[in-house]
Image: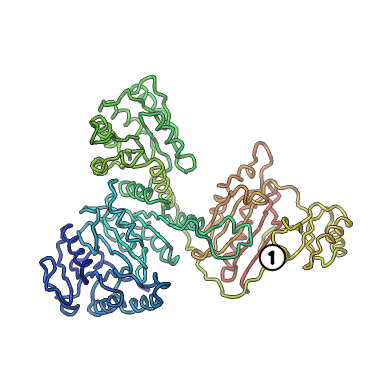
Amino acid sequence: MTPRSLDRLLRPQTIAVFGGREARRVIEQCDRMGFAGEIWPVHPKLDEVLGRPCYRSVSDLPQAPDAAFVGVNRTLTVDIVRSLSRAGAGGAVCYASGFSEATVELEDGAELQQALLEAAGDMPILGPNCYGLINGLDGALLWPDQHGMQRIERGVAILTQSSNIALNLTMQTRGVPIAYMVTLGNQAQTSLSDVACALMDDPRVTAVGLHVEGFGDLASLERLAAIARRSRKPVVVLKVGRSEQAKRAAVSHTASLAGSDAVADAVLARLGLGRVQTLPALLETLKLLHLAGPLASHSISSMSCSGGEASLMADAAVNSTVEFAALQPQQLPRLRRVLGEMVTLANPLDYHTFVWGDLARQTEAFSAMFEGGYALNLIVLDFPRGDRCDASEWSTTADAVIAAASATGALAGLLATLPENMPEPVADRLMANGIVAFCGIDETITAAEVAAGIGRAWNASPPLPLLDVPCMDSEIETLTEADAKAELAACGLPVPQRLLASSPREAAEQAERLGFPVVLKGLGIAHKTEAGAVVLNLGNSDAVSNAATAMASKAGYLVEKMIDPPVAELIVGATRDPVFGLSLTVGAGGIFVELLGDSIILPLPATRTDIHAAISGLKLAKLINGYRGRPKGDLEAAVGAVAVVADYVVKNAAHLEELDINPLMVLPEGRGVAAVDALVRRRR
């Protein structure tokens, strides 16, 4: 379906307002922001509102409005939206609650929301159950409350389902230039992705931030990512619900590694959409993206006049991809000359206070640091309280940062470790001069990491379309290990030589045919090791017969040729997420699955390049690469085996529910791999 045009709704020249108190507030806010268009109040009894004549109905309006704020009860909202749609209005904000979000208290909520959709027809609506939008570029508001925004010429757009969070974000004093604030409420018709895509068409929008309570369909998310890449306007997402668990039976080890939040991380990274975990991190990342866009690398520098701050900076980057790269040789003589012999030249750099208050020397020191080729250069500086202290020397440092960035052309940020120590006038001045006014060390590191991640994604080839195949709605069956291995082996996955047996005696006979040593497994038992249904390294017929008798497996036995000790063990699996569908998990296998949690999720389909990068990114990769002189593992064979599994999952996506190979034994280089255990659950 062709997306509805949101141009008139987002950038209106004429606005109609319906209702009492809330409608009056919309007019007040438009007047405060200097809206130059026409505003038409509609009310059945009032003659005028704030000096503007009232109209009695939609049919009485001079023309179809570009946008309408409908601030009446839920039943009347449906009628007004119907009239607006028939008149050819550009769109409406539906303020009322009591629709699908209130089905517990109001049994007709879902039905009324459906009626609202039918009434709207092709006319776009925001909500219901939302405040609407603030357009800070044109001063156009469909917003029934006070707010903290002001008119600007260019800036970021922020979208959220939550009106209260949107209101809070407008009150920020961090120097974030907000061009649009849009709330979506129930997203009954128009989604966050729809609005984000429309806003990226505005050349005055530099970046987009999304506060997401739940993702819609994958297609809209992919469309958003493609438009962001094409328009070079980065998107950063704050996805709530990290504790959300997929509502499915977690039979396999893979399921313990692939929670829905982890899958969301992987999908967003693949699409080149940034991910943050907090509102402060969202704001700090948007500031960086507004001024600089994606970063060219993860390499950053830091300078402060405190060893304590330098240590905090270094520690903050420990678990991130951000790197404090070493100083370049050409930087050292200049830094030494300016800072003196007492300063240890390193990154992060504690420049002490020898140049404090000296604009020329600070500018030279900062310039020397900025010429190291770092993607982002940070100066840590907390301003003193303006009501009790003199901040003139701190202002000198800010001036030096501006001068050094101008002289070198490098991207710089001035970082206050505490948000309250970055006064808003200072932040505004810094941002106006191209210096990112950062608040908070952890948030700044996150911003750099996210911006660099988007840059890396954009520099790579566009991703393959995500696997988006709905699962059949039928009964789930679990294949026996023997059947699962037979099916995977037919696709090219290496598995041990194996034979089936229905009794202890037959198991011993099959072992003779295979040749000792062998492994004996009871069929039809999940998590065999924990259940005592696996016995390794059986060296003769009696041992096999005795082990089978002790197991007493009613479903029979699987006898396999024992595999030589591996270099490393991997887990390879697929699980179905309720939102994102099937994805592949690769990680440290065997007994280390839950102990280490060393795993990477790959959205599907996945290329051999993707798989190679995933395995190489594991901590376990050190073993495969020959840890401390030990033999190297057959990495290429492991990549090939995982590629076989990925292809199997894609081809069987319509009915596959869960797949688990643990372990996939990685043998010494040149000897391949072997999948020694396999679980497949699928719809009949």
Please state if 370 lies on the left or on the right of 493 as rendered. left
**Badge 1: few (under 14), some or many (20 or more) residues near its Cα, within 10 Å?**
some
Q: What's the amino acid at mark 1?
A: Ala
Please state if 412 lies on the left or on the right of 600 as rendered. left
Decide: is 656 above or below 329. below
Q: Residue 666's spot in the image, x, y percent?
A: 67, 50
Q: Residue 270's spot in the image, x, y percent?
A: 47, 56
Judging depth in this view, the residue of 132 and 164 nearest the camera is 164
Q: Is residue 39 visible?
A: yes
Q: Residue 684's spot in the image, x, y percent?
A: 63, 74
Judging depth in this view, the residue of 197 and 162 nearest the camera is 162
Indicate the quadrant containing the N terminus: top left, top right, bottom left or bottom right: bottom left
Decide: is 536 above or below 321. below
Q: Which residue is mark 1?
A: 484
Judging depth in this view, the residue of 541 and 239 nearest the camera is 239
Q: Quadrant of residue 542?
A: bottom right
**Which residue sits at x=16%, y=70%?**
40
Q: Secondary structure at mark 1?
A: helix
Q: Residue 584's spot in the image, x, y percent?
A: 57, 59
Decide: is 218 above or below 321. below
Please state if 151 lies on the left or on the right of 647 as rendered. left
Q: Quadrant of residue 229?
A: bottom left
